[in-house]
Image (cartoon, grey):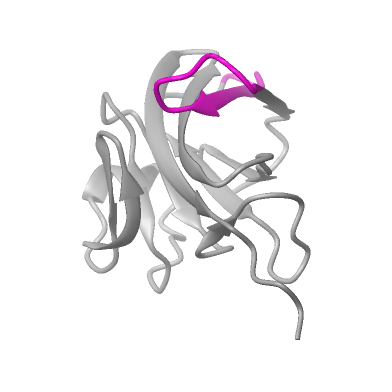
């Protein structure tokens, strides 16, 4: 495990579950931290680690979402809010226009630091994941 997990979700680095690698078209970024949603029907590879509150650009909050069940050409709907609160809310919709595998690249920005709870919905599934966002450092 690595720092950055929160709520009910741990963040990992290292061996990737077989189902996650297969769903990503056997093209997983093995060098990145990743999270497994609940139920284990989706995963998130964190390119922009650590995730930063606000709208960072260097690095951006890039997340590669991978779903275990077929996308069937449908979008991934990402709804989030701080863990234990109902607001503020973030909402993203990502098209099923990337390959290989059942993947959705995105950049999910949130307005404040803390543990954020995300509900992921796609054509054949639904899962939930908690991700930590930290306060962005001031430029020097």
- By secondary structure, the bulk of the magenta-drawn segment is best described as loop
Residue shown at 50%/63% (left/top)?
Answer: 50
Residue shown at 39%/24% (left/top)?
Answer: 128
Give coordinates of residue 70: x percent, y percent.
47, 24
Q: Is residue 55 left or right of residue 75?
A: right
Membership of 86 in magenta stretch: yes
Give coordinates of residue 86: x percent, y percent.
53, 14
Quadrant (top left/top right/bottom left/bottom right) for the C terminus: bottom right
Residue shown at 25%/34% (left/top)?
Answer: 8
Q: Is residue 75 left or right of residue 122?
A: right
Asked if residue 120 is positioned above or below residue 51 in the image, the reply reads above
Asked if residue 61 is positioned above or below residue 76 in the image, the reply reads below
Give coordinates of residue 135: x percent, y percent.
58, 58
Q: Is residue 110 left or right of residue 1?
A: right
Membership of 21 in magenta stretch: no
Residue 21 shows in the view: no
Give coordinates of residue 84: x percent, y percent.
40, 21
Q: Magenta segment, which residues?
A: 72-89
């Amino acid at each position: 495990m690595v720092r950055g997990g929160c709520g009910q979700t741990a963040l990992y680095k290292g061996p990737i579950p077989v189902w996650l690698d297969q769903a990503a078209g056997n093209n997983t970024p093995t060098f990145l931290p990743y999270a497994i949603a609940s139920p284990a029907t989706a995963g998130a590879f964190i390119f922009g680690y650590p995730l930063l509150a606000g709208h960072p650009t260097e690095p951006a909050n890039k997340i590669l979402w991978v779903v275990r069940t077929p996308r069937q050409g449908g979008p991934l709907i990402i709804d989030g809010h701080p863990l234990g609160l109902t607001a503020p809310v973030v909402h993203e919709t990502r098209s099923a226009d990337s390959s290989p595998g059942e993947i959705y690249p995105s950049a999910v920005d949130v307005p404040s630091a803390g543990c954020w709870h995300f509900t992921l919905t796609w054509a054949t599934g639904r899962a939930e994941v908690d991700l930590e966002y930290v306060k962005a450092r001031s430029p020097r």
